[in-house]
């Protein structure tokens, strides 16, 4: 069993100040596969001090040189692709193909996009009699979740570095092994000491210490809305900049002109990817009453192909499995029609949940309002487009969505949805487009030029 006892601070691995550790569990086998250090507030302080000391030189480094270091980091991550993919499978449970294509492929592409963006990003521009400067915020505290352990790290750390900020990362305690591999790639890339630092540990200890530290200028957090509120309150109380990427309850709307079979299958592929453990999952499917039963039948047939242990991986932990099962039981209790799946474990071992489809769901039901974060999809009827829009927008969240139908009608409907990123007729994910939400889905944007801007102050000089 692997035991990792240190944090990465000031360009080297350092022992932490406590004897505490966090167990890493393989969710497919339920076996402990490693222990990592549980860093303390003192360890966070050392990391922040290192980041603060490194900031002036890194901020003054020309964008072209920062781009070269980020390109080297991308290459170092890509060189470890097989090891990272296997680690994501071991600690998250992602099927191997998904681990390679998405959990490694996407962050490598995102890192490369920032190396390229630095060649054209307008850090300085003329506006009338003013020169507008974009300057790095300072030391960034990045707190990342477990569902996309490498992508979420890259989506925060790399744009922060591109902006000229220095970073202290606190990765999720469920999936720290992937973060350790990222730190090793950073070390190999030749990034100056102190520019990137990492402390593993628990959210209420290391994470809170990072948010509260007076040496941190900005906090970027991805996770649940409940924890995000706490992070936002702490950071706001200290008048720090904060970026929050939180929960979702995204709707996929099938307009009357939609290809029902293609729309249903596309919605399910999105909703069940990563075992439904994604904040942008299209977990609410809205269908006109005249095509409703047809759509439910297509969904039931399609779900048969999502076999637990094969195409569908486990949930990350026993606690997450129990949470999702609790929502399934709540849906049954509130009167939704259970079409496929249910609360019974599909396998004797591992934190698996059967892909579950509910029909006859009404907008006020718990399973139609709260984020479940598992392989559970609910189908709702609507009467007309105004009713569909009311239902689609009728949650506290506004992260993502989808619309299917005649192109002009689908685009017009998408413009009226209260969400930050909407796919029209199966539009592909774009790593250069801004990602983030409305309402309680968060504050700020990640990816592309908008993601870089999050880590910059704006200054104007008048002449």
Image (spheres, rainbow, N blue to C red):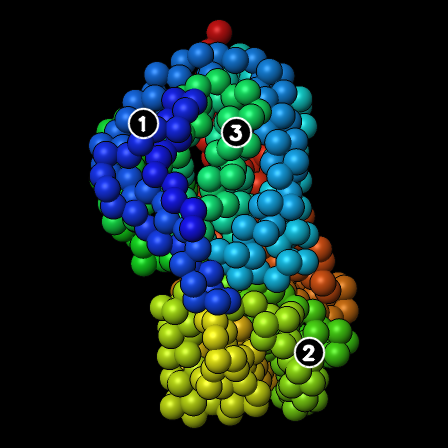
Relative vertical location of residue 34 with respect to residue 55 in this rendering, above or below: below
Q: Which residue is mark 2?
A: 305
Foreground pick, 353 / 210: 353
Against 435, residue 371 (above or below) is below
From the viewer's perspective, is 178 left or right of 71?
A: left
Residue bearing mark 1: 48
Query: Within the image, what quadrant is residue 46 found in?
Result: top left
Q: Which residue is mark 3?
A: 186
Say which residue appears at 51% left-offset and 92% top-offset.
337
Residue 85 in view in this figure: yes
**Residue contact between numbered discs 3 and 1, judged by CB atoms under 8 Å:** no
Q: How many marks?
A: 3
Q: Observer-nearest residue: 258 or 148?
A: 148
Quarter location, residue 190: top right
Residue at 38% over, 84% down: 330
Mark 1 vs 2, N-terminal side: 1
- Separation of marks 3 and 2 at Cα, in angstroms: 39 Å
Report whether 351 appears left or right of 306.
Answer: left
């Amino acid at each position: 069993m692997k035991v990792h006892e240190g944090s990465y601070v000031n360009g080297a691995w350092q022992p932490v100040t406590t004897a505490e550790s966090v167990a890493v569990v393989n969710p497919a086998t339920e076996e402990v596969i490693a222990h990592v250090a549980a860093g303390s507030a003192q360890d966070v302080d050392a990391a922040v001090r290192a980041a603060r000391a490194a900031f002036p030189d890194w901020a003054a480094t020309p964008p072209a040189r920062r781009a070269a270091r980020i390109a080297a980091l991308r290459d170092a991550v890509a060189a470890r692709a097989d090891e990272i993919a296997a680690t994501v499978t071991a600690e998250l449970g992602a099927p191997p193909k998904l681990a390679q294509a998405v959990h490694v492929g996407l962050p490598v592409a995102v890192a490369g996009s920032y190396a390229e963006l630095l060649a054209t990003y307008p850090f300085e521009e003329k506006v009338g009699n003013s020169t507008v400067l974009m300057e790095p915020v300072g030391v960034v505290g990045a707190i990342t979740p477990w569902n996309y352990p490498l992508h979420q790290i890259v989506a925060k750390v790399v744009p922060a570095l591109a902006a000229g900020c220095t970073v202290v990362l606190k990765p999720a305690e469920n999936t720290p092994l992937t973060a350790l591999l990222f730190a090793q790639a950073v070390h190999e890339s030749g990034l100056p000491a102190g520019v990137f630092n990492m402390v593993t540990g628990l959210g209420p200890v290391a994470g809170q210490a990072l948010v509260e530290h007076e040496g941190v200028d900005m906090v970027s957090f991805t996770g649940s809305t409940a924890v995000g509120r706490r992070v936002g309150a702490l950071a706001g109380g200290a008048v720090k900049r904060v970026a929050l990427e939180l929960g979702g309850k995204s709707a996929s709307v099938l307009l009357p002109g939609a290809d029902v079979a293609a729309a249903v299958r596309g919605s399910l592929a999105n909703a069940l990817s990563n075992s439904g453990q994604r904040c942008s999952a299209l977990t609410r499917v809205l269908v006109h009453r005249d095509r409703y039963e047809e759509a439910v039948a297509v969904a039931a047939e399609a779900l048969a192909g999502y076999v637990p242990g094969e195409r569908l991986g486990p949930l990350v932990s026993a606690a997450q499995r129990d949470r999702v099962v609790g929502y399934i039981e709540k849906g049954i209790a509130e009167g939704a029609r259970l079409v496929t799946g249910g609360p019974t474990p599909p396998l004797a071992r591992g934190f698996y949940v059967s892909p579950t489809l509910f029909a006859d769901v009404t907008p006020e039901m718990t399973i139609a309002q709260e984020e479940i974060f598992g392989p559970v999809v609910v189908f709702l009827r609507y009467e007309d487009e105004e009713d569909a829009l009311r239902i689609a927008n009728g949650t506290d969240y506004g992260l993502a969505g989808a619309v299917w139908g005649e192109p002009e009608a689908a685009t017009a409907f998408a413009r009226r949805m209260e969400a930050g990123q909407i796919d029209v007729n199966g539009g592909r994910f774009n790593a250069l487009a801004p990602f983030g939400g409305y309402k309680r889905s968060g504050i700020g944007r990640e990816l592309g030029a908008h993601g870089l801007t999050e880590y910059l102050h704006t200054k104007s000089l008048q002449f």
